[in-house]
Image (spheres, grey):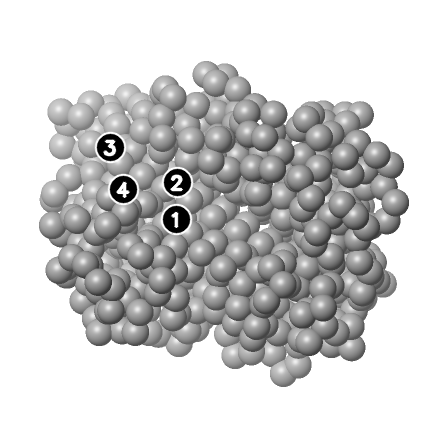
Amino acid sequence: MFEVPFYVSTAGSDSNPGTQAQPWLTIQHADSASRTGGDCINVAAGTYQATVNIQNGGTSAANNGYVVYRCQSMNACKVLSPAITYSLWNFQYGGNFVVVDGFELDGNNALQAGGAANICFLTDDVTAAGTSNTQAGSSSHHIWLLNNIIHHCGQSGVQFNAKEWYYVIHNTTYHNAWNSGYNGSGISLWTAQCIEAGALNCFTSGVAGAPSSDWNYTPSGNDTATFNGVGAWTPFHNVISWNVSYNNRITALSGLACNAHTDGNGIIMDTFFDHFAYTLPYQYQTLVMNNVAYYNGGRGLHTVNGRLVTFANNTAFNNGTDGCETKSQWVAGDLDNAGNSNTWINNLALTVQSVGWLGAAPTGPNNCSLIPDDNGSVTGVTFNNNILSTPESANVVAPLVHACLNTNATNFFNCTNNKCSTDPGFVNATAGAASDSAGNPVGGTWQPGNDNLALTATSPAIGYVQSPPPSWLPAQNVDAGACHHSLTTCPNPGTTNY
């Protein structure tokens, strides 16, 4: 792999040449028009209290085509929000083909309760109409987030919008969305848009008024290589895998009325329609695999108007703890589908939420391990080899309007192809506090309970997977859920900050 090294250190100076002996002082200084594919920005351990806006990236989806920002000591480079700001680390315009590896992003809870930065990692079309003279829209594509710890951002930990070829892999996101007036989640993809030349439903194909642009990307390199679970992910254009997402929630800090609490999810795939007119459905596949989502206020793993999304081998536990959502007549499923043409295989969910609706004692299940159809009109969705703790045939009682299994869902979901009313058999998992209708924790603090989601030796998840497995499924996925049966602790140690 061809690599040109540059260096950043808290002991450096931005007047330096960026060599190992004379490093730069700020990460932002590394972003310049001279960046090209193969450049590697090596950042020394330390705290960098400044925002980052990447507008100059690499050249291609090849090993030597990316600009890489890497912390030289894993998670020892803290990017700390310096003030109340919209985004802590942003990508826009020409900030394509970029890798960020091994950083801690901290929205700065000490500066403002819930976090002074609204979003930790962001790519977005700020014009919402594609008026950039370099691209149809200012959002960036081909962004990799690897091995980062992302927390205390008021809206979202990761918010990737308005393009595609996004990879969020081996990250931990926690304590996000607490004080946002716009809602938010741990990891969110919204308004996915394709950039391929002449492809169906890409930005300029059939949208009246769409500006002329250079949306003529031809996939190459790792875009089209055979799936190997490392750099090549064909047929998927977006990959959210091996992440831990917990304790993301909307709280009383947000000032939102209960009927506006609609997020605070661990992971959400949201509104896969173009960002220009919201009419063109996204035509490419997205993979959400091997993630652990627990103790979130909203859903663990969720899609609303997401399409062609595959949810595989994820583990969800103790989500739906936002009592404000139940007050506003929502049931938050640990796994929750409100989109068409999606696939759910080999996932497992244990639901433990038990606070009462409207402040009353519960009279039935007030949460669901899976909601197959969360809008009443879902089509083209398949569910196979999922392990679910709640009886999916059970309706919830008034005043809630969403049942675990509504009439339409009975057309495509059944317990023959899945294990219903089944405890997945975690080593040591107990519920954390849920909130009351005002968004305050009931009988505790905002900390998870016991969260060792490794499988016991008798777990029904062991060996329970779709057979034959899809060609893109990694060989280690021999059990349902995200935790291999050989693990004694899952998720990995070191992810228990709150």
Q: Based on the displayed image, in which of its 4 quarters is residue 411 positioned?
A: bottom right
Identify whether 440 is placed above or below 34: above
**Percent of width and height locating residue 57:** 22, 49
Q: Which of marks 3 and 4 precedes in the sequence?
A: 3
Quarter of the figure with the C terminus: top right
The residue lying toward the viewer, choosing from 381 and 175, is 381
Instruction: Find residue 121 and name its label.
Output: 2
Residue 65 visible in this rendered orientation of the protein: yes
Position of residue 287 measured from the top left corner of the image (x, y, whole percent): 49, 64
* Badge 2 vs badge 1, beta-carbon distance below 8 Å: yes
Q: Where the N terminus falls, by quadrant? A: bottom left
Name which of mark 2 and mark 1 comes first in the sequence. Answer: 2
The amino acid type found where label 1 is placed reads Phe
In the rendering, which numbered label is found on residue 28?
3
Q: Which residue is mark 1?
A: 160
In front: mark 4 or mark 1?
Answer: 4
